[in-house]
Image (spheres, rainbow, N blue to C red):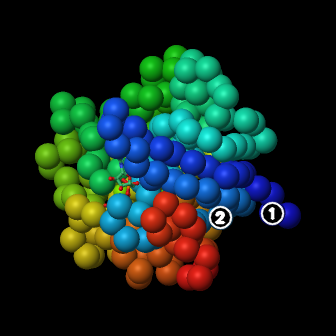
Amino acid sequence: MTCIIIGAKNLERVYFNGVIKTYALKNISLNINGGEFVAIMGPSGSGKSTLLHQLGLLDIPTKGEILIDDEDVVNLSDDERTRFRLEKLGYVFQSYNLIPELTTLENVYITPMAQGIPTEKYKEMAKDILNKVGLGDRMNHYPSELSGGQQQRVSIARALVNKPKILYADEPTANLDSDSSKETIKLFRQLNKEIGQTIVMVTHELDEGKKADRIVWVKDGVLDTDKM
Ligand SMILES: Nc1ncnc2c1ncn2[C@@H]1O[C@H](COP(=O)(O)OP(=O)(O)OP(=O)(O)O)[C@@H](O)[C@H]1O
Ligand SMILES: [Mg+2]
């Protein structure tokens, strides 16, 4: 049975710098099912990152509704929003944002450690996900001792260590060579199939978009329904 995990209705995001209003998102309605792997594509400046930020609770829409896992997430308080993100959402960005002084294993377990999970348990969680992303033999390496693709896999493991309901990725392969890019997308596909991970990924690469279950096209802040 499929069920909607993200339901967005009439989303609008206007940026106002005191002089100019920019309508980054105009009127976007979109449903994403649990267990779906969705790619968001479109020209530069079309609103892809803005859309991902709204759906990922990294920004608040000017208008519209967003339900995630049946919860109205637009009207949460700051504390509730932070807690919701920590418990249910994971993020991967272009830059891996790993802590250079920490090993692979430590970079992955710092979040569950900070949440007060017992030592044995958080180490086991981190090892488990690192094995899944194919880094079981790199646990004690530092980021500077890893390739770009491996560093991105550490950041994916870090995003997934808490078993978030949804993984958001904004151009996760933008800084990778073509082999590492392919590996990263293959990993997303595999995580989606094996653990049913819901994934929402912005990409510029049509080859990558085609690997997802569905491509959502954005153009000038609206859905480009002609292409969908
Ligand atoms: N903080 C901001 N203030 C004003 N305008 C903004 C701000 N952030 C984004 N915009 C504008 O909103 C529009 C959408 O930006 P967004 O970053 O979502 O595009 P994008 O599709 O992700 O582009 P790219 O492919 O280049 O990453 C752009 O016109 C951009 O200039
Ligand atoms: Mg962007």
* Residue drawn 30% across the image and 54% down it: 94
- Is residue 162 visible in this depiction of the protein? no
Q: Is residue 208 left or right of residue 173?
A: right
Pick the front one: 223 or 94: 223
Instruction: List x then y, in percent, for residue 183.
Output: 36, 71
Position of the C terminus, as image quadrant, is: bottom right
Q: Secondary structure at mark 1?
A: loop
Tag 2–tag 1 contact (CB < 8 Å): yes
Amino acid at dot 1: Thr
Residue located 27% across and 75% down the image: 179
Residue 2, disc? 1
Q: Compare marks 2 and 1 and give the one earlier in the sequence.
A: 1
Residue 35 position, x and y percent, is 68, 60
Q: Which residue is mark 2?
A: 36
- Residue 187, image quadrant: bottom left
What residue type is disc 2 on?
A: Glu
Left or right of 211 in this view: 205: left
Q: Within 8 Å of ligand 1, the CB of disc 2?
A: no
Distance, label 2 to label 1, CA atoms, is 9 Å
**Residue placed furthest toward the front:** 19
Q: Is residue 63 visible?
A: yes
